[in-house]
Image (spheres, rainbow, N blue to C red):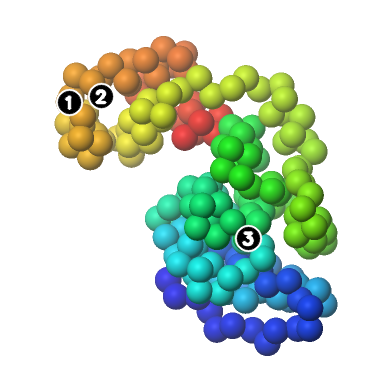
Amino acid sequence: MCPSPTRRHHDRADPVLLAEDQAMMRGALSLLLGLEDDLEVVAEVADGDAIVPTALDHRPDIAVLDIELPGRSGLDAAGDLAKQLPTCAVVIVTTFGRPGYLRQAMESGVRGFLVKDRPVEDLADAIRKVHRGEVVIDPDLAAAALRSGPNPLTDREREVLAEARSGRTVADIAGTLYLSESTVRNYLSAAIAKTGTRNRIEAAHAAREHGWI
């Protein structure tokens, strides 16, 4: 999706990119952030695949990203931004406040992580702090992450489970990931054992709930 037209730039305003797939939520956040004298939403996208190209075009100081987006997730895009536009700090704002997601975000270089039920004033304040070089994390989620154990899944097990989420067959998963069917079954068996579930669908669900995939 193409970014919306660039808004009028305020003097000394920090440029912000906003990625949110729900049009009403995206519009509300853009409007409310735009009321802040020192912030300006210079681009909005609804698709994860558009985040990096739009950021490279508009060069924002801050990217505010949802996690669940069509195309690439906000977490994947955050890792890409860290490599391709390291001057752009990332703040994740999501409905899914899961410890596993927080760990993935921190590993991707994310500087802020908030859940959507917090006031918009908290988001504006977080953007300012992140722009100053601070790290801002929802305190309840930070405490939950400390209590939760590390992700037990390997990268390959995560990839296989992510493909299994939609009910794809072993043959389909093998073809997509360029693996043999026996290798896919081995990864699925290991993931099922690690998640303490009975089948690959339950394992994928459990991994998603923990933010491991």
Left or right, 110 with respect to 187, comes to right
Closer to the camera in the image, 32 or 109: 109
* Residue drawn at the location 70% of the way across and 49% of the way down: 112
- N-term mark: 3 or 2: 3
Asked which secondary structure carries label 3, the reply is loop
Q: Label 3: which residue?
A: 87
Element assignment for label 1: loop
Query: Residue at coordinates 61% horizontally, 34% vertically from top-left?
Result: 103
Residue 161 % position (x, y): 37, 30
Vertical side of 191 occupied by 131: above or below: below
Q: Are marks 1 and 2 in contact (CB under 8 Å)?
A: yes
In this view, the mark in front (3 or 1): 3
Q: Is residue 108 above or below residue 6?
A: above
Q: Label 2, on which residue?
A: 184
Place of residue 106 in the rendered image (x, y in percent of width and height, measured from the top left) = 63, 39
Q: Secondary structure at mark 2?
A: helix
Mark 3 vs mark 2, CA separation in Å = 39 Å
**Which residue corresponds to the image point at 68% horizontal and 87% vertical from the top-left?**
8
Which of label 3 and label 2 is nearer to you?
3
Kind of residue sitting beneath label 1: Ser
Residue count near mark 1 (Cα–Cα under 10 Å), binned few <14, some 14–19, many ≥20:
some
- The image shows residue 43 at horizontal and vertical percentages of 58, 74
